[in-house]
Image (spheres, rainbow, N blue to C red):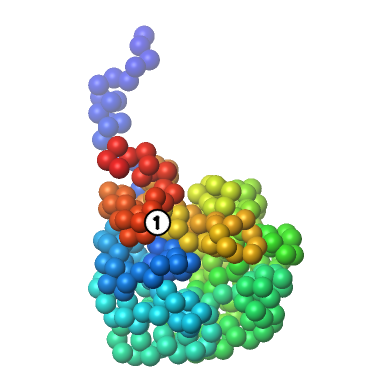
Amino acid sequence: MSDLPTAAEMEEIAGSAAPEGPGIVLCECFARDGLQHEEAIIPAEAKIAMIDRIADCGFRRIEITSFAHPQQVPQFADAEAVLRGVRRRPGVLFKATCPNPQAVKRALAAREAGWGPEEISLLVSASEGHSQRNLKRSREAQWANVAEMAALGRDAFTLVGTISVAFDCPFDGRTPQERVLEDAERFASLGVTRIAIGDTIGSATPPRVRDLIGWLHGALPTATFIAHFHDSRGTGVANTLAAIEAGLTHADCALGGTGGHPSRIAYGEGFTGNTCTEDLATALEAMGYATGLDMTAVAAAGLAAEQLLGRRLDSKVIRASPKE
């Protein structure tokens, strides 16, 4: 007797569609986090064209600018011009970073004018050492800052809170899980509904990611956690996938693995880069997760990012493409 399926069984197998994988929302961060440390100022028109190309890929969340003071971050002196210039699309949310209350007021003015972002992001460090070095203030002073920003913006925007050094700090060592939960709960108490878990120096491992994310989910089930992993040790994709397997449905990434800390930074491991969009999206699609992205358009956007910056970026997928 043959063990091969009969013709009728083959027809039944072929006619049975595989169940659709769960949906994963990727936030493309090239236009803000990816460009923040670029020394050459990218013209607003080029940023707008790139953001429109990114939106054409099917991204539902796009980080597009920062309201940082132009003297501190010259790359985003054109924040208002970029927000005015991008084409709005149903179901696509634009996010802007706000480092202080004055930045939130600029975001509010843009919103009132009809072209502001739908989301704004706020930042805390999970360690005292990183807060003092990176934000130039204590954790408690930053939390007071964040509370003021949340009060200003909670009625106008979806608030996104980022917890930096959620795994390890270059100054204070390993970050206790209890500290991360404490910060997540403080964000939630301020009306911050989305909370990004940041692996700032790229030192996390998949087992640690699964452990922390699973624990946070159980302790604060009402929050929407977001994976934000840097790639200094080449584990950005692996750690993001581990977070998704632990239950996350949202993750940050950047075309070509751009962004992170620049090589001249005085701590960490030099240029880290964000988790690469092209590689992460390809892995998710292969695993059966639905991203809603046009993968051909994503690859084209990755090549466009290389052309815009004038150098080869870090996408393994693009390097492996015969069309590259």
Q: Kindly identify the amino acid type of the residue bearing the numbered disc 1.
A: Leu
Q: Tell me the quarter of the image containing the N terminus.
A: top left
Q: Nearer the viewer, residue 221 or 42?
A: 42
Residue projecting furthest to the right:
172
Of 61 and 125, nearer the camera is: 125
Q: Nearer the viewer, residue 16 or 87?
A: 87
Quarter containing the C terminus? top left
Determine whether the residue tagged by mark 1 lies in a helix, strand or loop.
Answer: helix
| Residue 216 seen in this snapshot | no
The spot of residue 144 in percent (x, y) is 63, 86
- Which quadrant of the view contains residue 4? top left
**Residue denoted by label 1:** 255
Which percent across, then down, holds residue 35? 43, 66
Residue at horizontal 57 percent and vertical 63 percent from the top: 264
Q: In the image, what residue occupies the spot 62% across and 73% down? A: 134
131 over 277 or under it: above or below: below
The residue shown at (61%, 58%) is: 201
Asked whether, in this view, residue 126 is left or right of residue 34, the answer is right
Image coordinates of residue 71 in percent, x first then y, are 48, 82
243 up-or-down from 94: above or below: above
